[in-house]
Amino acid sequence: MSRGGTIKHLRADQPSTPSIRQIIDDYRDDPSPALREQVARALNRRGIALGRLGRPQEALAAYQAVFDDYREDPSPALREQVARAQPARLNSAKRSPLP
């Protein structure tokens, strides 16, 4: 299976497995836009799963990573992932307890 295929098949219901963290860490800065897009998708899916598990602070961190890592990337696919992360990021911030 290709690296992109591996990332694509990550399950959202396993947000903190070592494999998803490893893939995100390994390919977050890959020069291939296709791989970076899959990492952004995995982060968004991780945020969704963490939100469903009642872990809004961790969900916020996943969405924030998409925003921080890819907001200035010129790739349309990555811009789309940032656009998807933005409202979820704000929603998670509202649900997170204040420090």
Image (cartoon, rainbow, N blue to C red):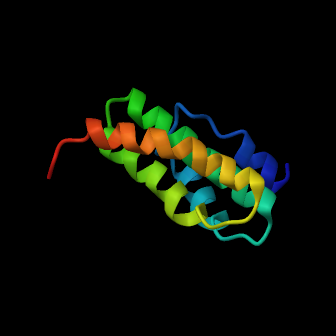
Query: Residue 37's spot in the image, x, y percent?
Result: 71, 54
Q: Residue at x 46, y 39 (%)?
A: 88
Q: Residue at x 38, y 43 (%)?
A: 90
Q: Could you tell whether 44 is left or right of 29 in the image?
A: left
Taking the view exactly as shown, the residue that stands out farthest to the top is 52
- Taking 32 as reference, is 8 above or below it? above
The one of 33 and 79 positioned closer to us in this rendering: 79
- Taking 6 as reference, is 51 above or below it? above
Query: Residue 61's spot in the image, x, y percent?
Result: 40, 52
Query: Residue 57's spot in the image, x, y percent?
Result: 31, 45
Q: Residue at x 52, y 52 (%)?
A: 18
Q: Could you tell whether 98 is left or right of 85 in the image?
A: left
Which of the 4 image quadrants contains residue 39? bottom right
Number of marks in the rendered image: 0
Q: Could you tell whether 77 is left or right of 87 in the image?
A: right
Q: Residue at x 18, y 42 (%)?
A: 97
Taking the view exactly as shown, the residue that stands out farthest to the right is 1
Query: Residue 89's spot in the image, x, y percent?
Result: 42, 45
Which of the 4 image quadrants contains residue 41? top right
